[in-house]
Amino acid sequence: MDNFKPGDRAPDFELQDQVGGTVKLSDFKGGKLLVYFYPKANTPGCTIQSCSVSKAKDDFKSLGVSVIGISPDKPSSQKRFDSLFGLGFPLLCDTQHKVAEAFGVWAEKSFMGKKFMGIVRSSFLIDEDGKIMQSWYKVSPGDTVPNAKAFLEKKD
């Protein structure tokens, strides 16, 4: 799949969150949404990424942006991750990686010479009508927040 470009429609999704609720893209209609994908809860890079999003969630809220994280983890792992770091926003469970596939972030990776399928750390800003405002693929853990803030501040 090609990378999303500004103006492309974001793939619809409906996933369970860390507390057993159902979260859909349509829940955020009328507001902006930052969606970030991370490989595995409670790992060093994912902790850096998620904690930085958590620290910035009030800044995002003041800009009219909600935030959600998505990984292939089970609800129990997501709940433990949220509790451990007090993240305080929806962590969605894409255990079948269907949403990751739809966003083009489920891909072959390699580590220490072994190839496997997994999440390519990426983030997306989605507008009030469900369209991609901006996308960032293969981001480092600390870049999700600065990328989104710089883009949003430039738009104002």
Image (tube, rainbow, N blue to C red):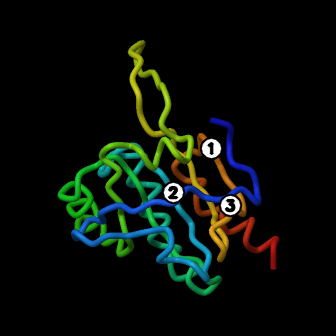
Q: Residues within 10 Å of mark 3 (few under 14, many from 20)?
A: many
**Residue at label 2?**
36
Residue at the (26%, 58%) spot, across then down: 78
Which comes before the other along the chain, label 2 or label 1? 2
The x and y percentages for residue 140 are: 56, 45
Residue at the (30%, 72%) spot, across then down: 86
Q: Find the residue positioned furthest to the left.
A: 76
Q: Is residue 112 left or right of residue 104?
A: left
Which comes before the other along the chain, label 2 or label 3? 2
Secondary element at tag 2? strand
Query: Which label sits on residue 137?
Result: 1
Secondary element at tag 1? loop
Give the residue type at disc 2. Tyr
The x and y percentages for residue 149 are: 67, 69
Q: Find the residue positioned furthest to the top.
A: 113
Q: CA distance from mark 2 to mark 1?
A: 10 Å
**Residue at label 3?**
132
Which is nearer the eye, 67 or 22?
A: 22
Give the residue type at disc 3. Ile
Frontmost of labels 1 and 3 is: 3
Give the residue type at disc 1. Tyr
Secondary element at tag 3? strand
